[in-house]
Image (cartoon, rainbow, N blue to C red):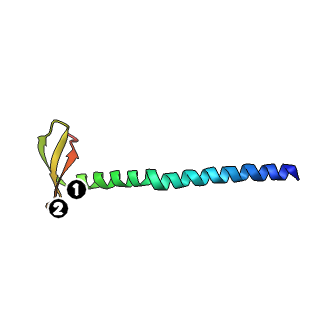
Amino acid sequence: MREATGELNITLVIVTLVGALVVFFYAVIWPLLDKEQTYQMKCSRATCKTDIDADGMVSCEDEDGTTFKCKYKG
């Protein structure tokens, strides 16, 4: 009976750790990836000027007329 209790404890620890990793991924990492992908798609659709700032950014304009900065890609 004690061997079964030990296996249950190890299983519970592993399931808890996997659950914690899933929560961390969806709470921290996924929003960062989603935000960066949205930014890159917005920059790829925009019309950008050729004037490069000192920090390597260019001024871009969206279809709606809003202006924002994007990384210069050459």
Label placed on residue 8 = none
Q: Which residue is drawn at 86% across and 50% down?
A: 2
- Check the image and name the residue furthest to the bottom: 64
The quadrant of the image that shows the C terminus is top left
Question: Which image quarter: residue 66?
Answer: bottom left
Residue 44, given in percent of the width and then of the height, sits at 24, 52
Q: Which residue is drawn at 73% across and 48% down?
A: 10
Residue type of the residue flagged with mark 2:
Glu
Residue contact between numbered discs 2 and 1, judged by CB atoms under 8 Å: yes
- Check the image and name the residue furthest to the top: 54
Question: Which image quarter: residue 41?
Answer: bottom left
The one nearer the camera, 53 or 9, is: 9
Residue 54 lies left or right of residue 23; in this view the side is: left
Report the residue marked by disc 1. 45
Q: Is residue 10 positioned above or below 65 on the image?
A: above
- Check the image and name the residue furthest to the right: 1
Task: Bin the neighbour count of mark 2 within 10 Å (Cα to Cα): few under 14, some 14-19, many 20 and up.
Answer: few
Q: Which residue is drawn at 34% across and 51% down?
A: 36
User: Who comes first in sequence, dot 2 or dot 1?
Assistant: 1
The one nearer the camera, 41 or 1, is: 1
Residue 28, given in percent of the width and then of the height, sits at 45, 51
Report the residue marked by disc 2. 63
Residue 7 lies left or right of residue 52; in this view the side is: right
Looking at the rendered structure, the secondary structure element under dot 1 is helix
Separation of marks 2 and 1 at Cα, in angstroms: 8 Å
Q: Residue at x 18, y 58 (%)?
A: 62
Looking at the rendered structure, the secondary structure element under dot 2 is loop
Residue type of the residue flagged with mark 1:
Arg
Q: Is residue 56 positioned above or below 6 on the image?
A: above
Residue 4 lies left or right of residue 28; in this view the side is: right
Task: Bin the neighbour count of mark 1 within 10 Å (Cα to Cα): few under 14, some 14-19, many 20 and up.
Answer: few
Residue 47, given in percent of the width and then of the height, sits at 15, 53
